Image: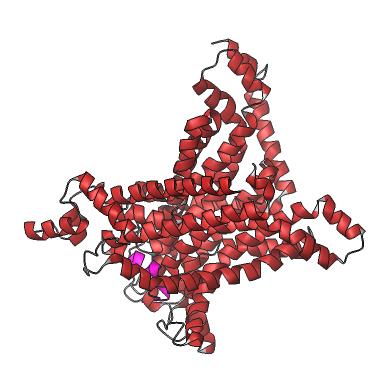
Amino acid sequence: MTQYIIKRLLLAVLVLWIVSVIVFSAVRVIPGDICKIVTAAPDVDAKQCASIKHGLGLDKPVVTQYLSYMGGIFHGDFGTALISKRKVWPEIRTRIPLTLELSLIATIFAMALALPIGIISAVKRDGPADYGLRLLTIGWLSIPGFWLGTMLIIYPAKWWGYSPPPGYTDIWNDPLKNLQQLYLPAIALGLALSASLARITRSSMLEVLRQDYVRTARAKGLVGRVVVTRHALKNAMIPVITLFAVQFGFLLGGTVVLESIFSLPGLGLLTLSSVLIKDYPVVQGLVLFFAIVLILINLLVDISYAWFDPRIRYA
Amino acid sequence: MTTTTIAQPPMAPSALTERRNLWRGLWRFTARRPVGAAAGLICILLIFVAIFAHQLAPSAPDALFPTAKLKPPSAAHPFGTDNLFRDMFSRILIGSQISLGVGFASVFVGTLLGTLFGLVGGYARGWADMAINRVIDTVMAFPPLVLAIFFLSIFHATFFTVSMAIGIIIAPVTARIVRGAVLSVVNLQYIEAARALGSSHTRLMFRHVLPNVSAPIIVIASIQIGNAILAEAALSFLSLGIATDAHPSWGKMLQDSRSVWEQAWWTAVIPGVAISIAVLAFNMFGDALRDALDPRLRGS
């Protein structure tokens, strides 16, 4: 077990390092004159250009740049924003709670919808309920989240005159208002996730329901519901968790779109706005941060498998 | 080299029987999976519309109708007009070009990269496999859309770079599936036989392994088209795509009408429905193809 965790950990560190090198190199391979790109002006005076290059750390030798960049990361210093001249890390940190909460609500919503759908679909295999639910989930997979978000803004307002309170309220100030502001984007964010989770739950359940121990459980007279929820579901969860770890990246990407539609000042909105104004230190910091989060989640998922299923430890 | 003919069927099927097999296969697919076949038909229709969009569109996408600002759908303008006096129907038709064009191009890029990496990794194993796996891990460490956005913040958006941006996020999935498929065939006897006959590694990989993992490659590529169209729409919606006034895309149309969504439902509903129908058709077709060609991949 320890050996397995150490191996996973080392791989995660390796990937993290490659990611950091990519993020570091990215700004250095931008084709064209960086000063013109950042200012979006045809001519940039030398002084302004020097300050931009200094801001990006491009005025020193590459090795020095790299060492100070890596050193900074280890001290929680992601550099300084070009435009606002604010430190990047505090900018990111203050926006984490909103995006975290949004992704959490979306995940809970997706799971709450996916598990029952997947289970019913598997238990009633090839029945009308199964076909209906499968059609429904493949339909959900095809709806773009940003469009669903749009619809959720327009139609409740049009039909019932309902619209959630504008802006964003901190959850610690007014939890109820906060939830009212976040549940619509969370639904738009979570629907596609719920569809793919429901589909994998179905196929994983089907796999497990065929197993001998499920037949044994039925044979010894257990009620169908107990067999399904107590015996089968737990064992069917590993592929679901795997897929969730993969799909979590899509969820984080989705926050970029939905935060922009619902004007929520989270990490996603910051990503979009800094990309549009070419504020590279912020973009680099965000991309690195997202990658760190995703790598950590995958590491936790990997370790949790070994915890749940001893067979994996020795594979 | 004449020796390699041993690994191929003794008599090459004539073009005539091959064509007959194709029709029979199509017929069987239609009979067994009518929904998938219908979805396939819609896909073909969409491709047809995209190719002939300029001939089919009643007006140019940026033609102005000075008397028709934000008019609801009518006989003259089946999908209404937008806030800039333009015919939405024409814009939707032309918009299919970017959506499908980038969708196909990015799946092509992703499949090419993914197949190459998966094939080499699964075939060579050892350190090459290890290195390729780390590359895949690294790409998968980025949230897909964020990676595409990051890519497009560095490279100016053109048809090629947008397709690359989406292709890169598609490739790791293909690579993993191809690698798995390669691992399952690489130890089979016919590969051993071909190797014993002196085939080079390149020849073994591309002539003997690749054709035998083509089914999962076709399946995964067809499933990814829908996702690629969605990704392109999202990038266009974020104004990071290649759409212009004269060459709209569905995602950008939605973004452009943002200020008038509430007063003109058709500007918000129709582009979204167009995206959903296209993605749904390709998803369902891909699903049916997967069930028919490679039942092992069911549920993936």
Does the rendering let one see residue A42?
yes
Q: Residue furthest front?
A: A2
**Considering only vertical position in the picture, is B78 above or below B132?**
below
**Considering only vertical position in the picture, is A203 above or below A173?**
above
| Spot occupied by residue A110 in the image (x, y as percentages of width and height) | 60, 68
Q: Is residue B244 magenta?
A: no
- Quadrant for residue B216, please give it: top right
| Spot occupied by residue A314 in the image (x, y as percentages of width and height) | 65, 43
**Residue at (35% x, 50% y) in the render:** A20
Q: How many marks?
A: 0
> What coloring was used for the rendering?
secondary structure
Give the residues in magenta.
A261-273
| Left or right placement of residue B257 versus residue A314 in this view | left
| Left or right placement of residue A26 versus residue B6 in this view | left
| Left or right placement of residue B46 versus residue A207 in this view | left
- Judge by depth and name the residue closer to the eye, B21 or B62: B21
Q: Residue furthest top?
A: B2
**Residue at (54% x, 86% y) in the render:** A159
| Spot occupied by residue A299 in the image (x, y as percentages of width and height) | 52, 54
- Judge by depth and name the residue closer to the eye, A67 or A209: A67
**Considering only vertical position in the picture, is B47 above or below B210?**
below
**Residue at (85% x, 65% y) in the render:** A224
- Judge by depth and name the residue closer to the eye, A75 or A159: A75
Q: Which SS does the magenta portion mostly show? A: helix
